[in-house]
């Protein structure tokens, strides 16, 4: 007889996400795993023997815990002490200037003033801040505000000076130093140009970063998230080491780490010792991340059709920016194939998607487990041929319906109403037979609680933005489909062991909801809340 704690969960409305047994009303937990699940009347006598606890849920809805297959856990955690340039705190450039001024007064001279989350579509002025705006908040210390998409920084004049960026500095490959009509840098650094200032920005020390992560784990538990990802650091931080330390100090979620290809080119093999790639571990390295283009709201996602004209285009059509070379794609695929690792490619625009697919499908898949050999992130506007290739090849799609939901102003301005409705074609991809899951990409989400699953589910089911704008009703999912993509399919996409379904032998990582999400009006899906979260058999959150 095992010494592990044995608990009976009874009278529950369990959505298992197990196709062989979609519904249940009882389960027996032994230690970290589910020992038995099914109808309460059918619980075998030996499963009831030596119970330590019986929990009667009185019909409450239970689902597998949410799995965020694309977020930046360390980045999100470290942003917590910074200025949040998001509504309702910041709704204009003037609000941002004041927030910078206040932070400078708190910090004193020399220290970097940092912030995140701005989106010109959500600012009253409907434009990006510039160096001159930030200078009004602080001129004697460097300022860096990251855009919500994480692909663009806005810095002040002091930061440009420290990084040595002048009107004569050439654009780096795959990036752009935005300039005004006279050729002066505006302080907006797009794609790889953002990295020109990265070496000069101080990192959080390890103790602070671990504390931030344990606090993030508590937030994620309150949102029902039982597993997360760190889809690469942008500054070279060893996120695997930080997450492993955080797990020792209470971070409860399973977590998969991806490393940016640009940081691996020198010696990629050394970054993936076998013991750190074991998927059965709580924290493991899952693969490599490559950036193939930018963002829609930042006008850097790489399209075949140009963006709608904007004042900063200087009369030229803008198609976005390819941010990696053909050689990068070839080398990353070759390395992942030889090392048995998954390749994740950020590809939003049509041209970026087509180019990435051509590379990752050449030679066929290389992994043998549930997880696809390659996954494309975001996949905003796939061509018809790309949709067919996704279905035929098994390459995964990890997408975010929350983007258009919360950034609708930028999407309408940059793409127009009809292209916005065709973006993130969830129904088309599912009906074609593509492998698909949904995630948040937090903190690259213009939402006050960027890791919250429920607005994301609402966006997938209603296909309406937060303000009611139609985002393409023909691409809507059912609630059950959205939940499957956030649990079972997300676990398969990453390769999380024992997660995504509630079945015997799987981890007892599940969520109790305050109402039955399967019967909530679609317009109220974002109001659903988590009553309790269990991770590997232990209750880690309970609402009061």
Image (cartoon, helix red, strand yellow):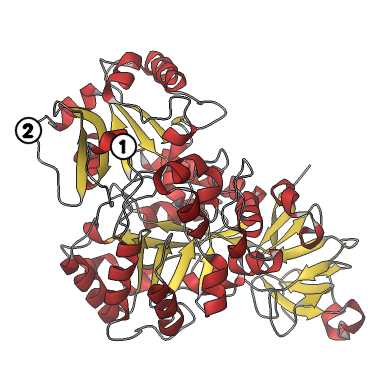
Is residue 347 something that shows in the picture?
yes
Q: Which mark is residue 168?
A: 2
Residue at x 53% of width, y 71% of height: 428
Q: Disc 2 on helix, strand or loop?
A: loop
Q: Reply above or below: 420 against 113.
A: below
Q: How many marks?
A: 2
Considering the image in quadrants, where does the N terminus appear? bottom right
* Distance of label 2 from label 1 (alpha carbons): 19 Å
Where is mark 1, residue-wise? 153
* Residue 413 location, quadrant: top left
Q: Residues within 10 Å of mark 2 (few under 14, many from 20)?
A: few
**Percent position (x, y) of residue 222?**
66, 48
**Relative to 302, is 488 on the left or the right?**
right
Please state which of residues 260 and 328 is positioned toward the viewer in this rendering: 328
Q: Residues within 10 Å of mark 1 (few under 14, many from 20)?
A: many
**Relative to 252, is 15 on the left or the right?**
right
């Amino acid at each position: 007889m095992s010494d592990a704690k044995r608990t009976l969960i009874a009278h529950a409305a369990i959505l298992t996400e197990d196709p062989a047994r979609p519904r249940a009303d009882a389960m027996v937990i032994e230690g970290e795993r589910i020992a038995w699940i099914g109808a309460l009347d059918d619980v075998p006598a030996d499963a009831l023997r030596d119970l330590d606890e019986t929990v009667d849920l009185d019909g409450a809805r239970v689902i597998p815990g949410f799995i965020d297959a694309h977020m930046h856990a360390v980045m999100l955690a470290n942003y917590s002490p910074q200025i949040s340039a998001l509504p309702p705190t910041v709704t204009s450039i003037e609000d941002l200037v004041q927030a910078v001024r206040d932070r400078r007064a708190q910090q004193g001279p020399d220290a970097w003033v940092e912030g995140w989350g701005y989106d010109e579509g959500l600012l009253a002025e409907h434009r990006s801040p510039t160096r001159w705006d930030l200078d009004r908040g602080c001129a004697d210390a460097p300022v860096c505000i990251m855009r919500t998409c994480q692909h663009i920084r806005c810095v002040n004049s002091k930061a440009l000076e420290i990084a040595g960026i002048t009107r004569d500095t050439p654009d780096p490959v795959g990036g752009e130093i935005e300039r005004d009509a006279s050729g002066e840098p505006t302080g907006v650094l797009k794609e790889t140009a953002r990295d020109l200032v990265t070496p000069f920005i101080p990192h959080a020390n390890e103790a602070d970063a671990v504390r931030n992560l344990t606090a993030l784990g508590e937030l994620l538990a309150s949102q029902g998230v039982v597993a997360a990802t760190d889809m690469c650091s942008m500054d070279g931080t060893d996120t695997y080491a930080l997450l492993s330390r955080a797990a020792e100090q209470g971070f409860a979620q399973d977590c998969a780490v991806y490393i940016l290809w640009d940081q691996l080119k020198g010696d990629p093999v050394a970054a993936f010792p076998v013991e750190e790639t074991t998927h059965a571990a709580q924290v493991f390295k899952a693969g490599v991340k490559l950036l193939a283009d930018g963002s829609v709201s930042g006008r850097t996602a790489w399209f075949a059709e140009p963006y709608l004209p904007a004042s900063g285009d200087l009369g030229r059509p803008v198609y976005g920016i390819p941010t990696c070379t053909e050689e990068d794609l070839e080398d990353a695929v070759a390395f992942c194939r030889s090392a048995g690792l998954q390749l994740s490619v950020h590809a939003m625009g049509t041209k970026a998607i087509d180019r990435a697919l051509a590379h990752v499908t050449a030679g066929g898949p290389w992994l043998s487990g549930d997880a696809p050999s390659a996954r494309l992130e975001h996949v905003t506007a796939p061509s018809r041929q790309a949709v067919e290739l996704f279905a035929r090849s098994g390459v995964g799609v990890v997408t975010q319906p929350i983007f258009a939901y919360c950034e609708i102003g930028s999407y309408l301005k940059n793409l127009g109403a009809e292209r916005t409705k065709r973006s993130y074609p969830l129904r088309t991809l599912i009906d074609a037979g593509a492998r698909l899951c949904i995630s948040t990409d937090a903190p690259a989400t213009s939402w006050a609680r960027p890791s919250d699953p429920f607005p994301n589910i609402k966006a997938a089911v209603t296909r309406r933005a937060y303000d009611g704008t139609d985002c393409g009703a023909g691409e809507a999912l059912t609630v059950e489909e959205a939940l499957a993509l956030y649990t079972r399919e997300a676990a398969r996409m990453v390769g999380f062991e024992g997660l995504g379904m509630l079945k015997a032998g799987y981890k007892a990582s599940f969520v109790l909801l305050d109402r039955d999400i399967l019967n909530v009006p679609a317009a109220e899906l974002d109001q659903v809340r988590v009553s309790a979260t269990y991770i590997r058999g232990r209750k880690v959150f309970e609402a009061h």
